[in-house]
Image (tube, rainbow, N blue to C red):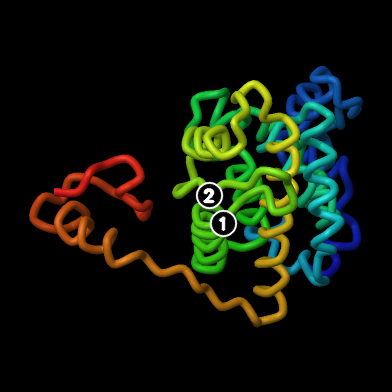
């Protein structure tokens, strides 16, 4: 694996990812990457997950700035957060085209589902860590987002209550008195905050200091005792129920 680290190049990555066809697709998508020749390819992609390539802490504030910067350049929340983390991680992570996360903006092409910043940050985390480590970080990131007044340094801050773009924007509009169409500066800052929080958790996992603090509320546990694996067994989730459903 050590030898593989030394010789893995952008061309090798593209060849291993699918040869000339993959390279041509990327070249014609405006990325400016020349199509590599598949003949003679001898290098495979690193074994997943790419944990061993993450060997030094990320600059959390630099990640925050990059996330906001890329959102401001029109990449959107999902691609902005994803690209900020990949670029900060360096190779081979930076070989992955950030455009694959562009669909996530606005809660997946404006459907208002999972916040794009969470979507992009979680995708980056999943490249670095697999299995339980990935799940622990993403779980904590989702909980942090749901319970934290965001953006951290914005004039108007609001708590989403869950990881949904729809709720996040609606609650911010209530607090700020602004319209959803005016959310640009807010979502720009939020994209940086979410990417930075993911970087913080990744650093803690790298250093062996990561300790999850999320605990489901007693109210939600009471709901899930029946509805998730209980006698009703008719749903799945970890989100607070009262944000959308009345008690009974």
- Tell me where residue 6 sits by quadrant: bottom right
Alpha carbons under labels 1 and 2: distance apart:
6 Å
Say above or below: 240 vs 106: below
Task: Inspect this view and state whether residue 204 appears.
Answer: yes
The reply to whether discs 1 and 2 touch (Cβ–Cβ < 8 Å) is yes
Q: Residues within 10 Å of mark 2 (few under 14, many from 20)?
A: some
Q: How many marks?
A: 2
Residue placed farthest to the left in the image? 231
Disc number for residue 205 = none
Q: Position of residue 70 (x, y in %)?
A: 82, 37
The numbered mark at residue 148 is 1
Which residue is painted at 81% across and 57% down in the image? 89
List x then y, in percent, for residue 238.
36, 55
- Say left or right for 82 vs 41: left
* Circle 1 crowding by C-alpha within 10 Å: few under 14, some 14–19, many from 20: some
Q: x%, y% of residue 241?
A: 30, 49
What residue occupies the far top of the structure in this picture? 28
Question: Please, what secondary structure does the residue beneath circle 2 have?
Answer: loop
Q: Residue at 48%, 40% (x, y): give it.
A: 164
Residue 141 to residue 212: above or below? above
Q: Is residue 15 above or below residue 94?
A: above
- Sequence order check, earlier mark of 1 and 2: 1
Residue positioned 82% across, 70% down in the render: 2
Give how far across and how far down residue 96 sits, in percent.
76, 42
Q: Which residue is mark 2?
A: 159
């Amino acid at each position: 694996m050590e030898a593989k680290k030394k010789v893995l190049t952008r061309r090798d990555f593209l060849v291993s990812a699918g040869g000339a066809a993959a390279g041509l697709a990327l070249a014609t998508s405006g990325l400016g990457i020349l199509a590599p020749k598949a003949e003679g390819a001898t290098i495979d992609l690193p074994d997943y997950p790419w944990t061993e390539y993450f060997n030094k802490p990320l600059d959390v504030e630099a990640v925050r700035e990059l996330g906001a910067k890329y959102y401001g350049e029109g990449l959107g929340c999902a691609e902005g957060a994803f690209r900020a983390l990949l670029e900060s991680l360096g190779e081979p992570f930076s070989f992955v085209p950030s455009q694959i996360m562009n669909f996530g903006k606005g809660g997946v092409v404006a459907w208002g589902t999972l916040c794009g910043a969470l979507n992009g940050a979680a995708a980056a985390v999943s490249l670095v860590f697999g299995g339980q480590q990935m799940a622990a970080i993403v779980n904590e990131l989702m909980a942090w987002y749901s319970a934290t007044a965001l953006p951290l340094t914005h004039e108007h801050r609001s708590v989403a209550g869950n990881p949904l773009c729809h709720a996040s924007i609606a609650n911010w509009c209530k607090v700020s008195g602004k319209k959803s169409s005016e959310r640009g500066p807010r979502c720009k800052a939020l994209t940086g905050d979410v990417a930075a929080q993911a970087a913080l958790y990744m650093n803690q996992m790298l250093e062996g200091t990561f300790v999850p603090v999320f605990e489901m509320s007693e109210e939600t546990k009471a709901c899930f005792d029946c509805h998730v694996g209980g006698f009703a067994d008719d749903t799945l989730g970890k989100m607070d129920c009262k944000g959308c459903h009345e008690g009974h």
